[in-house]
Image (cartoon, rainbow, N blue to C red):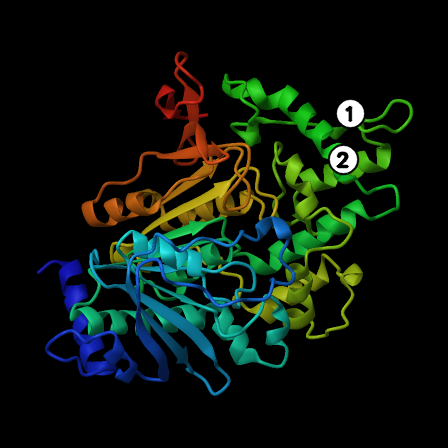
Amino acid sequence: MSHRAALLTGTALFLSAALFSAPANARTCDNLADLKLPNTAITHAEVVAAGAFSPPPVAAPTGVPPALILPPPSFAAVPAFCRVQATLTPTSDSDIKVEVWLPVSGWNGKYQAVGNGGWAGIISYPAMAEAVKAGYATSSTDTGHVGGSGQFALGHPEKLIDYAYRSEHEMTVKAKAIIQAFYSNPPKFSYWNGCSTGGKQGLTEAQRYPDDYDGIIAGAPANYMIHLHAWSIALSLAVTKTPDSFIPPEKYPAIHKAVLDLCDAKDCVTDGLVGNPRQCHFDPETIQCQDADGPSCLTAPQVKAAKAIYSPLVNPRTKELIFPSVEPGSEMGWGLLAGRTPVGIAVDTFKYVIFKDPNWDYHTLNFDHDIAYADKVDDHLNNAINPDLRPFFKHGGKLIMYHGWNDTAIAPGNSVNYYESVLKVVGSPAQNDIVLFMAPGMNHCRGGDGPNVFDAMPFLSDWVENGKPPEQIVARHTTKGAVDQTRPLCPYPQIAKYKGSGSTDDAVNFVCAAP
């Protein structure tokens, strides 16, 4: 018997014996309401007809920039599924809501859990719908609280642990049990798919619970959460240091144009994208106003602020890196973090998690001793930066990471740094188990001037199930629903290079090669 077959068999036996007494035949959806699982109350189980799902109303998330909030999705194309709702209580202060959706027909025999964004606080219904449409059984959790603020953590350390990692693991174990009860078989393969907080959740699973998933997709992960949120505050402080420091959004196009004029053609294609930002060395002083202030130039204080935006955040005393910077080409998205006040999610981290003071003033954040104190308080709870993924890789686990070069919510270098740290610790064999795709012109998780629409799940499943690593992922750019450009995303550090002939809007005319 192979190692994977033995693992699957052992998992099935454990779930059957330890979690519930499985009947000889599959349960009906309604009967799942009677399923007994540890620390679990199944509150509802019913079949939802094809196209009939309507998500419950939710309040607009607080502390999350509007650019990161998706418009209401349509569920018309979702096939019939069994919807199971449950509450998990691994501690006396836990109140973890989860949902498990099980295709009524056409199940592909696999499980795909989906991640959250920001502080979570909601079930990720749109992502669950996509998983079910692809034939997967799926699950999502609110991570143990309601709403998009970090206030829930104040005075509730167990709820903070639920948010940080426990809710995802508890959901995974219980979802697999529910899947086996419904289909009389455990999932053949289990996958995680998430971006931003969902990307952090995926890396946390690989680090803490390496046997939970066979494959993980971690997009733009917020895995260095404490340092990320310190950087977010630092950007706002940099552009509001003096009344003259602030860069109004009306000037972003001029800065962006100057960057493109310098660096667009460096990849031999003039397409409005910086193909490899690490080869672009733009100095904001080149557009400093020579006379009066104007919309196409920066004043001296604004030049200083722009340089701060392009510079990594470092400890002012030790010069050690706290968090990397945004990249050239991202200028049109600077308003996300370089506003007059920091984003709420970052301030909440220091208010409710680190200093535990609702009245804490972000202006007082000290980037030397306060960051050291924050790391000590967090104690690797939310900072999911452990590079030793050998236990995950040992059982055949595969990890796909991706990040947009134009991301201004989470600096792209964070993914590069984590990827390289894994290679350094695990060694060259890790290249058989982890791959990073960097997307030129892509914003945070989606959107942007570059091709940014793609589905990494087929590539992950092919890698896990057939041993075929992804050599490239073709991404699309759409305008008003129509595809107007495709481009290959390449395994880092490779970039997409134009072959020299054919349309530069067609991926077939590019090849992945060294920079």
Please say if 318 is above or below 289: below
Counting other residues with Cα less than 10 Å from the Cα at mark 2, is it few (<14), some (14-19), or many (20 or more)? few
Percent position of residue 269, x then y: 50, 18
Mark toward the viewer: 1 or 2: 2
- What is the secondary structure assignment of the residue under circle 1? helix
Q: Residue at x 78, y 27 (%)?
A: 285
Q: Are the residues tagged 1 and 2 within 8 Å (C-beta)?
A: no
Q: Quadrant of residue 154?
A: bottom right
Percent position of residue 144, x then y: 49, 74
Please indicate, yes or no, whether residue 203 appears anywhere in the rendered image. Answer: no
Q: Which residue is mark 1?
A: 287
Percent position of residue 334, x then y: 68, 41
> Residue 250, which numbered label?
2
Q: Residue at x 42, y 33 (%)?
A: 476
> Residue 387, which numbered label?
none
Amino acid residing under circle 1: Ile
Q: Residue furthest top?
A: 501
Please say if 220 is above or below 511: below
Counting other residues with Cα less than 10 Å from the Cα at mark 1, is it few (<14), some (14-19), or many (20 or more)? some
Please say if 174 is above or below 272: below
Q: Quadrant of residue 502?
A: top left
* Horizontal side of residue 329 vs 25, given as left or right: right
- What is the secondary structure assignment of the residue under circle 2? helix
Mark 1 / mark 2, whichever is N-terminal: 2
Q: Residue furthest left?
A: 1
Amino acid residing under circle 2: Glu
Q: Quadrant of residue 493?
A: top left
Q: What is the count of numbered marks?
A: 2
Q: CA distance from mark 1 to mark 2?
A: 15 Å
